[in-house]
Image (tube, rainbow, N blue to C red):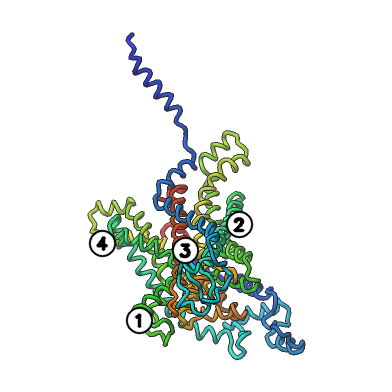
Amino acid sequence: MVFDTDRMTRISDDMVEAEAVKGRSLWQDAWGRFFRNKAAVVSLVVLSLIVLFTIIGPYFAVWSNEEIDWNLMGNAATAGQPSIENGHYFGVDDLGRDLYSRTIQATQTSLIVGVIGALVAVFIGTLYGATAGFVGGWVDNLMMRTVDILIAIPYMFIIILLMVMFERSFFMLFVGIGVVSWLDMSRIVRGQTLSLKHKEFVEAAHAAGVGSFTIITRHIIPNLLGIVAVYASLLVPLMILTESFISFLGLGVQEPNTSLGALISEGAGTIIYGTLWQLLIPLFFFVVSLMSLFFIGDGLRDALDPKDR
Amino acid sequence: MLNYILRRVFVAIPTLLILIVLCFLLMHSAPGGPFTSERPLPPQVLANIQAKYGLDQPMIVQMWNYVVGIVTNFDFGPSFQYKDRSVNDLIAAGFPVTLTYGSISFVLATVVGVSLGVAAALKHNTLLDYIAVGVAFSAQVLPNFVMAPILVIIFTWQLGWLPGGGWEGGKWPFLVMPVIALSTSYMASIARITRSSMLEVLNSNFIRTAKAKGLPTRTIIWRHAMKPAMLPVISYLGPSFVAMITGSVVIDMYFSTGGIGLHFVNAALNRDYSVMLGVTILFGVLTILFNLVVDVLYAWLDPKIRY
């Protein structure tokens, strides 16, 4: 017999290689898809830059956020514009406070409120939705009808009511915003849990004799994580919007704390004096952070929830 | 169908009651009553005032009276802040204003949003599509409280075309900026939703069949594609209605339109609980009613829903 040894080796090499090709996990796949999405990657970079700026920015500040520059107090319109010489890189507000420090502080506040608000909502919503989905039956029915009823209430007013009735603290803001935003989350998680419960791979696991607990930890939770991450990331900008709305009305965080909504409100109130920078600088940070958060959320959705495309 | 509507109404009624009770309890569990001030009132005076407003009765009786007052003659009680005006007076003064620019914004957002979305879907992957998507995406980060000052800078300060605020009985120059500020971000969302659902419908089998049959494009879109494509849009109308009602607070505050939102913010700053309660409940009722209408409309349009 004549062997084409070369060819045989090549084939056997190919076979070995084929064996070496590993299956890719959901997360590796998602990782790849996310990083192919240019808008999302650019947004991630921009957002990281903003976060970095809020962390190292204070070290370059000449004025603290509470200090008042008495020279500029009252004549912000004529002398308070952004300048390098007097250390007010972003100018001053009407009270002569340094806008650079205030913007950094406001951006920090808004981002933190966004993240914590989203976490509160995700925590309550996931727990509630997963419970309803797992347990099923009349418990599920009762729990979801309650959500149906609660979802029809205009929440902004309830949050404002809460903020006015109890002290206007950070804690109240987090709780208020988070507590009223978990409803959609719970619906999504419940739906996902229900559909997962009846998926073939869960059935297969059942048939193979895998215990319920292992099925939940090994098959249901990892599959829930994707959708939870997606909606959590889409919640963050919504939380920031909500907080800014409340702060714009003057009902949110209180001085000396500030948030982007509060700064925009101040800036919007003083445009008649021609102090445009007081509006435009916080507005810039607001729009850029929100936009990058939205893009990141969209990218995550495309990466983790591919059937949606 | 009637059955379905009745069932939805039966869900709406407990929702309303829960809303009223929840707000009432919140208001009354707040530390410090509406008459707590820096200088404490003499106890007799305080007792008299409380008796006048019925605050000396047990909570459950107060709540019952309040609910009965609302249900029987739409009476939200007196304002605690303005001694001579009731909550109803404030609502009667502000509501027509809010309703005027609110409904204009709502109709505008829906009509323009849907048209833009449909146009973008029909011209998929053309310049028009990209522009529409870009505009819709950027408008998402321009909520009413960002749009309002930007519009004032452009149209009042730079161009001097429009008054920066006021109402004057709703003459159109006073309407333009409130309407634009309120509707922009919802217009964008509606356009996005319309576009993606229209694209999905246009790619479906029954549209291909209609095309294969040789139907003109116009007929395909109006007779076949429009109805299923509108379903997600309709279900978004409920939330956008709520958001617009909420947004009207910003408009009233920023443009001094004198609508109901201003009273709400003032009440919130002055701790005038009865006004806050009244406005919240009024908006809650509107929301629930509107959601009811949307649900019925949805059920009527969607053949998949059994009722």
Q: Is residue A136 left or right of residue A7?
A: right
Q: Residues within 10 Å of mark 2 (few under 14, many from 20)?
A: some
Q: Are marks 4 and 1 on the same chain?
A: yes
Marks 1 and 3, Cα distance to the nearest angstrom?
A: 28 Å
| Secondary element at tag 1 | loop
Q: Is residue A271 left or right of residue A4?
A: right
| B10 in relation to A225, above or below | below
The residue lying toward the viewer, choosing from A24 and A307, is: A24
Chain letter of the residue beneath label 2 in the structure image: A
Marks 1 and 2, Cα distance to the nearest angstrom?
A: 50 Å
Eye-nearest disc, 4 or 2: 2
For residue B218, which numbered disc appears in the image? 4
Name the quadrant containing residue B165: bottom left
For residue B160, which numbered disc appears in the image? 1
Name the amino acid, label 4: Arg
| Secondary element at tag 2 | helix
Name the quadrant containing residue A291: bottom left
Rendered location of residue A145, percent (x, y): 58, 61
For residue A285, which numbered disc appears in the image? 3
Chain letter of the residue beneath label 4 in the structure image: B
| Secondary element at tag 4 | helix
Eye-nearest disc, 4 or 1: 1
| Sequence-first tag of 4 and 1 | 1
Q: Is mark 4 in CB contact (under 8 Å) with mark 1?
A: no
Name the amino acid, label 3: Phe
Rendered location of residue B94, percent (x, y): 50, 83
Task: Say which residue appears at 60% left-offset and 55% top-offset.
Answer: A123
Chain letter of the residue beneath label 3 in the structure image: A
Q: Residues within 10 Å of mark 3 (few under 14, many from 20)?
A: some
